Amino acid sequence: MPTETERCIESLIAVFQKYSGKDGNNTQLSKTEFLSFMNTELAAFTKNQKDPGVLDRMMKKLDLNCDGQLDFQEFLNLIGGLAIACHDSFIQTSQKRI
Amino acid sequence: MPTETERCIESLIAVFQKYSGKDGNNTQLSKTEFLSFMNTELAAFTKNQKDPGVLDRMMKKLDLNCDGQLDFQEFLNLIGGLAIACHDSFIQTSQKRI
């Protein structure tokens, strides 16, 4: 039985493989693949964005080497950024309750 | 129903809360909490390390601001590093098969 952390590491790899493999090269997320990932896996986040340019700007910000694609490290920065935002909001909510 | 990515973000926060909350302050992993996390959640990794100093050195390397604790960002760097190592090894194994 894998632990929760091991399952999570496996999930991150599986999700990246799933979306990055859509156009053949499964080591990079193209812009189309990134949009597909965001609109499927993180639809709860994307559907609340009123600004239609937000995903374009996210992709540009995440693409640190500016090659128009996201590699696994750049993808993990996205997941990490979202996790930190959720964690901070969780901590603030807990502190307000005290 | 949360998506696989959402479940994963929730898991990362829950695991960090679980181990960092052991000594009261649930925004930082102390050295003891880090060892408890590594030996429980990543036992498959730690039990294969023959060098007893490896966890000490990992903690020092991850503790970017050198405060003797790991915050959530530093914890995510650990998870990201492990995910990248697993992903690289997966890609290399796939390429050898072709």
Image (spheres, coloured by chain):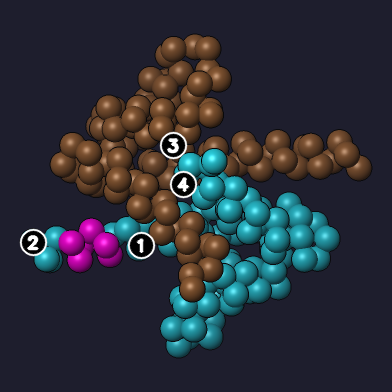
Chain colours: A cyan, B brown
Q: Is residue A91 magenta?
A: yes
In front: label 1 or label 3 = 3
Q: Secondary structure at mark 1?
A: helix
**Residue beneath disc 1:** A85
Residue B79 within the segment the image draws in magenta: no
Q: To which chain does the residue with label 2 belong?
A: A
Indicate whether B85 appears above or below A18: above
User: Residue B90 location in percent, x, y?
Assistant: 72, 40
Residue picked out by circle 2 = A98
What type is the residue that disc 1 sits on? Ala
Number of residues whose C-alpha sits closer than 10 Å to that of mark 3, classed few (under 14), some (14–19) or many (20 or more): some
- Name, please, the residue furthest toward the left: A98
Kindly check if marks 4 and 3 are in contact, taking CB atoms under 8 A apart as contact: yes
Comes first in the chain, label 2 or label 4: 4
Residue matched to label 3: B41
Looking at the image, do the residues carrying marks 1 and 3 touch, with CB atoms under 8 Å apart?
no
Q: Please give the chain letter of the residue carrying mark 1.
A: A
Main structural element of the magenta stretch: helix, strand or loop? helix
Amino acid type indicated by mark 4: Glu
- Asked whether residue B28 is in view, the answer is no
Mark-to-mark CA distance, 2 and 4 = 29 Å
The quadrant where residue B60 appears: top left
Residue drawn at point x = 27 percent, y = 41 percent: B20
